[in-house]
Structures are given as C-alpha cells and as structure tokens.
Amino acid sequence: MAMSKLSSMVDLFFPRACALCADLLGENQRGCLCTQCLAMLVPLANPCRKCGAPLGDGPLPGPESKRRKPAASCRWCKNRRWQFQRVLSFTVYSGAAIQAVRKMKEPAFEGLTRQLGDRMGDWLTGSLQSASEPPIVFAPEHYDAVIPIPQHWFRKLTHRYNQADVLARRVSAAIDQPVRSMWLYRSRWTQKQGMKTVVEREFNMFGAFRAGPSKALTGKRLLLVDDVMTSGATLHQAASVLRGAGAVHVDAVVFARGINASRQQSSNISDSAEQMEPHDSSSDPDFRRKIH
C-alpha cells in the first residue's frame, strides 16, 4: 500500500511517457510503452521458415484444398547455405519497430528492451497468440542454452550495455533455459553494418566471432538472440563458429526482421536495417554465395 502511494506521488511529479510516441502513460499502464504503440508491435503472420522474413498476408482464402501453402523459404534465402537452421522474427522492421530498435541500442532505454524481451518470450511460449492465429512451432525444451550476440570488449567497456544480452535474459526466463554468454565472444572490432551492402556486411563480419570451450559446446542445441536481422551476416557467422566448435543445432530469434539489404550502395539506407524491394535474385552473381 505504501509503495503504491509512493509510486503515485512519483508519477504525479514525474509523469511517465511512452518511449516511442512520448504520450503520457496512464496509472494502469506498466512498462515503457503506451497501449497504441504496443499494439503496433505485432508478430509476423507469415514469415519465411528459414530466415524469418515476411512473405505477405499468408495463405489465400477459399476452399482448403485450393489454398496456397506458405512457402518453405523466400527468394532471399532459397538455396542459400545458412549456418543456422532457422530464424524466428517477432515483427518486421518498419514503423514503430524502427523506433524501438534504435532506442534499444541506448542504455537509457534498457527498460524498453526488457519489456520487448518479455514480449518476445510471451510470443515464443504462445501467450500472445489469438485463437484465430496458427501457433508458431517452438519447443523450449529443444534447446540447451540461450546465447546473445556479443559486443566487442572495448564497446562493452565503454557502453556497459548490450541490448542483445538484455533480450536474451528475458527470453531465457520465459523459456526456462540458461543464458551462456561466455560461449560466444567477439574477437575483433567490427564497423557498423548500417551503411554497407550485403557483400560488405559479409566481409565485415567474417572472423568476427570466437566460440567458448568446445567441451561445453559439443552436442549442444542453441538459441541465438539479437535485436534485428537484415542480411543475416551476423547470425550466419555466429552460428558457423558455434557449429564449428561442436554445437549440433543453432536457431536464432530476433525482435525485428529487416527487409533485406540492397546489394548496391545507397545514400538513403537507414542506420541499422535497410529496406529493399523484392527482385529476382536468381540472376544475381552473388546469389549462390556460401557466406551471408
């Protein structure tokens, strides 16, 4: 009772505002987001089964016998040799999700990161699914550990905050699997990916990770966690290193899935994930590259 009164007094003199739209939050609204902004962060309805990219509005309406089944993979990752088995993406990188991803990178918005991590955990365990939506295929007991995408030690020293680590710990609590942040570390400094083409992203991330003790990783089934995926270069390299150290299965879960980065340098690319119109990748000379 006393804590409730204290909280009300604090809200009176220091009113809380939504982290995304800055509207004042009501007394009954907990967390960092207002109801409207939270409602805009909805799970993807029909993601690619490999890379988690949005595929559209789902199966066509009509008789069940004539409905189009969801594709197993999108044109972006078809025939690509990903080192992860699949990526589960909570939402698409657009609108409110763009603001959320950008703010999650700042230590001042760690509360927002925790709230979105809890939302990802609820989604993975089925708590966010409505009766009309097909449940995602996810079994927490399938994994031995949750691993956040790590930062370089120098950034960790100066920034003292890693949004992937915060997300991983909230997901870990939801699915009841331990976080093993020491099983993967960043062995060298990498430039920011935002203004790079796909090929540049690949070279930027190549050799950027090292795995922990092989005795700990041998035979393990792991779940990588990051805030956003665009080209897939980061998750691909991380999964490759973990599998090379003995892991037998690596999946990933991300808060937002960007529509894949353009292969051409563009001046209007956003700083963390770029938008690209669909195109026929089969004619692209880099289409069948092994490293992504």
Image (spheres, rainbow, N blue to C red):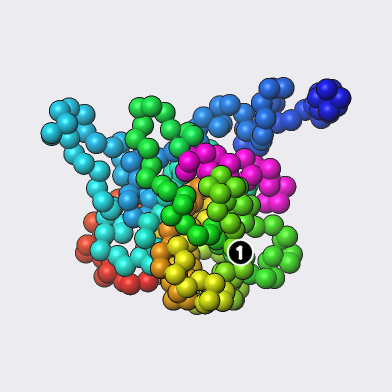
Q: Is residue 7 above or below residue 255?
A: above
Task: From the viewer's side, name the closer residue of 265 and 172.
Answer: 172
Return the x and y of residue 2 as percentages of the image width and height.
86, 25
Q: Quadrant of residue 165?
A: bottom right
Q: Is residue 30 above or below residue 167?
A: above
Query: What are the residue bounds of the magenta stretch?
Result: 105-125
Q: Is residue 58 left or right of residue 211?
A: left
Q: Main secondary structure of the magenta part?
A: helix
Residue at image location 38% in from the left, 42% down from the top: 136
Q: Is residue 210 visible?
A: no
**Quadrant position of the N terminus in the picture:** top right
Return the x and y of residue 219 as percentages of the image width and height.
44, 70
- Is residue 264 one of those drawn in magenta? no
Residue at image location 67% in from the left, 30% down from the top: 30
Residue topped by disc 1: 181
Return the x and y of residue 226 as percentages of the image width and height.
53, 55
Q: Quadrant of residue 64?
A: top left
**Mark 1 falls on what kind of element?**
helix
Residue at image location 72% in from the left, 61% down from the top: 159
